[in-house]
Image (cartoon, rainbow, N blue to C red):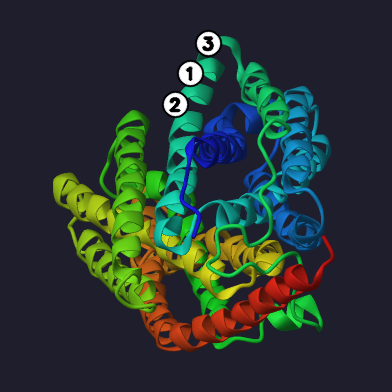
Amino acid sequence: MKTPTSRPLLTLGVLLAINTLNFYDRQVLGAVAEPVRQQLDLDDAQYGWLTPAFVLLYAAAGVPLGRLADRGRRTRLLAGGVALWSVLTALSGLAWSFWSMFALRLGVGVGEAACAPAANSLLGDLFPRERRARALAVFMVGLPLGLALSSGVSGFVADRWGWRPAFLVAGLPGLALGLACLLIPEPGRGAAEPHPVGTGRRRGSPFRLVLGGPTMRWLILSGALHNFNMYALGAFLAPFLQRYHRLTVQQAGWVSGAAYFCGGVGLFLGGWACDRLVRRRVAGRLELTALSSGAATACLVLALGQPPGAVGGFAAWLLAGCLFLYVYYSGVYATIQDVMEPALRGTAMAVYFAVMYLFAAFGPVVTGSLSRSFAARAAAAEGSAAVTDWHRAIALHEALWLVPMLGGLLAVVLYFASRTVTGDYERLQRWMATQGSRCAEGAATRPE
């Protein structure tokens, strides 16, 4: 079995930088939301649709791009995607209306949709199973790192020079990273597997093959639940801290940044632990992920149980919950690589992301709708003709209880996935061993 060398580690570094930029550029609009909304004269409903539209087109574009990642050169696909989303992010600084910003953000979504299928497929072929979770954990650290950097840098630029330069600063680094993609090598399909499988795959519809095993179906459902929660928290954590616990914008930003930092720690620790456990038992990764999701749910229950103004208690349980939440990425993304043959890994990630983002897009929408309804109910219960800020604070607190409720369901789904993963993995290994034998026979009979 091949082991990582400096070349795979160099590729991993480039992919980490790309994923960091991916989430940086995705977050920049949120970081400069108020000046954009005011200058373009947007109402809250218009602004609210900019994120779901981006996410939904990302989900739709990801499926054909995932198929392309399985059939063509992944490094070129990545280079094109990075260049496209970077140019359109920079051009977003020239938007003059809702529809111009809407169209540019849609284009950013198409470019970013190339990242996950191609990058995950590359990592699956660069790192063997026993090291795969750690490699994917490093790659996924780009998520909290990009969000944290974008929140800080974009806000700093917008505060001094306006919101339009913030988009330009976000877009320029992507052109250099696009060129870097063309310099990294394209590994062979299945290069990190114990059996040589070449470029072939099982016959039949690729989508039917991806969804044929029960583990993949459970993992897709888990992605929908997990990212519904992550997008709901991402949209409403700062408003909740400001309304319910009376923090300033800056103080809420510090707590949110600390939560992202703990998420990065959870990714690293989760990747290390998942690789240790998978050496002992195939189901070890998902068993740990299910346990971590259950622990995260308990922490979030304790955080939301804190009374108004108890910032220390809320923050302590929130940070612990985020540490456990981010273990999800280390365990689940590596498991998708484990149960999918090399020639279908891009498609598998694309299908997973398509379903995941369809649900994630509505995390803020559903949570916000519940909060609005609960605020009106709270005002009516007090006989108030107007909905006050305190009514909104209570309502958002009640709406956020949906997150730990779905978190508990997520832990159950991951547990069921852990019960099926051994069978799916062993079936795949038997097929790849057969492919390896055919490759060896073909080489033996080939004339010198």
Residue 152 is tagged as: 2
Q: Is residue 433 left or right of residue 137?
A: right
Q: Are marks 2 and 1 in contact (CB under 8 Å)?
A: yes
Distance from disc 3 to disc 2, alpha carbons, whole Å, reads 13 Å
Q: Quadrant of residue 112?
A: top right
Secondary structure at badge 2 equals helix
Within-10-Å neighbours for mark 2: few <14, some 14–19, many 20+: some
Of all residues, the one furthest to the top in this rendering is 160
In the displayed structure, would residue 126 be above or below residue 204?
A: above
Q: Residue at x 59, y 10 (%)?
A: 161
Residue 165, given in percent of the width and then of the height, sits at 65, 16
Q: Are marks 3 and 2 in contact (CB under 8 Å)?
A: no
Q: Are marks 1 and 3 in contact (CB under 8 Å)?
A: yes
Of the two numbered discs 3 and 2 on the same chain, state the one appearing first in sequence.
Answer: 2
Residue 14, given in percent of the width and then of the height, sits at 57, 34
Secondary structure at badge 1 equals helix
Q: Which residue is mark 1?
A: 156
Residue in front for this viewpoint, 251 or 4: 4
Residue 257, given in percent of the width and then of the height, sits at 35, 37
Q: Amino acid at mark 3?
A: Arg
